Amino acid sequence: MPPNQTPPAPGTLAQGDLSVDRFAIHTLCYRVVDGQLRFATRADDLADETTEIDPQAIFDYLYFHVIPSPRTIYKGIYRLPPAHTASMHNGQVKVTPHWVPKFDELRNPSFEALKGEFRQLLQDAVAAQLDGSKPACFLSGGTDSSTLAGMIGLASGKAANTYSIGFDAQGYDEMEFARLAARHFKTEHHEYYVTPDDLVQSIAKVAASYDQPFGNSSALPSYYCAKMAVEDGVTKILGGDGGDELFGGNSRYAKQRVFGWYQHVPGMLQKGLLEPFLKTGLAEQFALTRKAKSYVEQASVPMPDRNQMYNLIMHLGPAEVLTPQFMAQIDTAAPLQLERQVWQMAQNCSHLNKELAYDWRFTLAEIDLPKVMGATGCAGVAVGFPMLDERLVDFSLKLPTDYKLKGLKLRWFFKEALRGFLPNEILVKKKQGFGLPFGVWANTHPELKALATESLHSLAKRGVVRADFIETLLTQRLPEHPGYYGEMVWILMMLEQWLAAKAPNFRMV
């Protein structure tokens, strides 16, 4: 299904095919009942009073902070992965990819020719998403949203209406960059500062608006940004999602390249000298050698397994977090198996392009796009994603790897092609987005702390999470490291809020 096409209404299919677009902007869920394929855009539309909650899906949620396709929160209900087709024939469902990215890098490209093509494709992609209503976009002050703000003016001949969210918390607010972009492109700019009281008021509503538990904390600020646009008369808003994943803009791409350098160290030096020395007590005594040890440990693990070294629940230890009865019903290795499967889908390409294709699935299709689609849907406004225009995607597939990551310079081509169009301050700023200072607020705001505490204790009563872990998390770890452990509090709270609304009787047995 093309990304701009309206998804089908819920229905039943005895024979035939169902497909989703390359990034599953419009999702499709299905289940087989009496030899027929029932489908809907939401998993909860296919559930009934007999449908069971899947414990494995809960663990997947705790691992990814979302539930990636093809699993859903419900047993027997599945979500089509992006760029896949479900074929129903003779009572059997077969799911296969209808598109797999093929990176065909240009040799000896002309930068100027590509720059002109790229700028025109951007403008055309924005124009294709505008529907004649009030032209509007999210504006975080980052490269992608600022680009949309400027391109709307070129494509429509009108100043964009831009909408930004801020936080009155040190290190979390980048409103000045949004204001800079708004001034540069002379947009009609609108701002709202999200408060802890806003979270208390809206957490239950936003959690219940998703068809299954969704733990990305940016959903709340995205909702308030979309809500502000709706109150201003906007009926469709554009989002800049996709630019980082298509053109190499996430800081982890540079980090993984640094780890890749270790593979060029001769094996004899790795195994015969470096690794044995770094395991000694002497190496532990010095900060530099401790850093070297950490580097070697991480560089020695291949992708995507290396990602698990940073995973929150795996770092804490599943058995330390989850009850024995819950652990008995799940496979803690299943999420990594899915990651490995997706990692292998992109073939005959550079390591960076494999990372991009992997992120198209896990970052875009499973996290960022559902976040924005859910937040805007909850607010009551349509949304479009010009960066994911198929022409732009195909353009990105032919760019040389070093046009995306030149040395350690992120999204080199994108920024150089827009130099002179975007303000220089935005071209050199670090990526931030609508990050939420939840952990900080949960320590200082009584009502928010009470909501989180009540939610987590309620989840413990369901037999999912250990009560002693909850107690330690709330009374020791969160106060000591609010930024880090606030994420765990958030995902557990949102899980409980969803269960309270959609499956209040769920208990582990």
Image: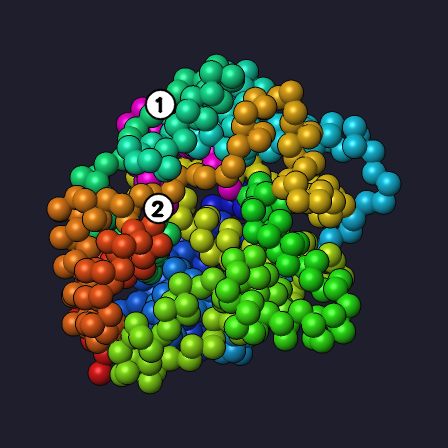
Residue 415 is situated, as x and y percent measured from the top left of the image, at 64, 32
The residue carrying pointer 2 sits among few (fewer than 14), some (14 to 19) or many (20 or more) residues within 10 Å by Cα, namely many
Q: Can residue 287 be found in the magenta stretch?
A: no
The residue carrying pointer 1 sits among few (fewer than 14), some (14 to 19) or many (20 or more) residues within 10 Å by Cα, namely some
* Residue to which mark 2 is pinned: 219
Which badge, 1 or 2, comes first in the chain's sequence?
1
* Residue at position x 47%, y 56% in the image: 366
Residue nearest the observer in this picture, 457 or 506: 457
* Residue at position x 47%, y 62% in the image: 310
Residue nearest the observer in this picture, 258 or 361: 258
Residue 509 is situated, as x and y percent measured from the top left of the image, at 22, 83
> Residue 224 lies in what quarter of the image?
top left
Q: Is residue 274 above or below residue 414?
A: below
CA gap, disc 1 and disc 2:
19 Å
Q: Is residue 490 among what the camera can see?
A: no
* Residue at position x 42%, y 74% in the image: 32
* Residue at position x 30%, y 67% in the image: 47
Span highlighted in magenta in the image? 218-241
236 with respect to 394 (left or right): left
Helix, strand or loop at label 2? It is: helix
> Residue 165 lies in what quarter of the image?
top left
Q: Is residue 249 among what the camera can see?
A: yes
Colouring of the image: rainbow
> Residue 273 lies in what quarter of the image?
bottom right
Residue nearest the observer in this picture, 290 or 68: 290
Amino acid type, label 1: His
* Residue to which mark 1 is pinned: 190
Tell me the number on the disc at residue 360.
none
Residue 301 is situated, as x and y percent measured from the top left of the image, at 60, 69
Helix, strand or loop at label 1? It is: strand
Amino acid type, label 2: Ala
Residue 484 is situated, as x and y percent measured from the top left of the image, at 35, 54
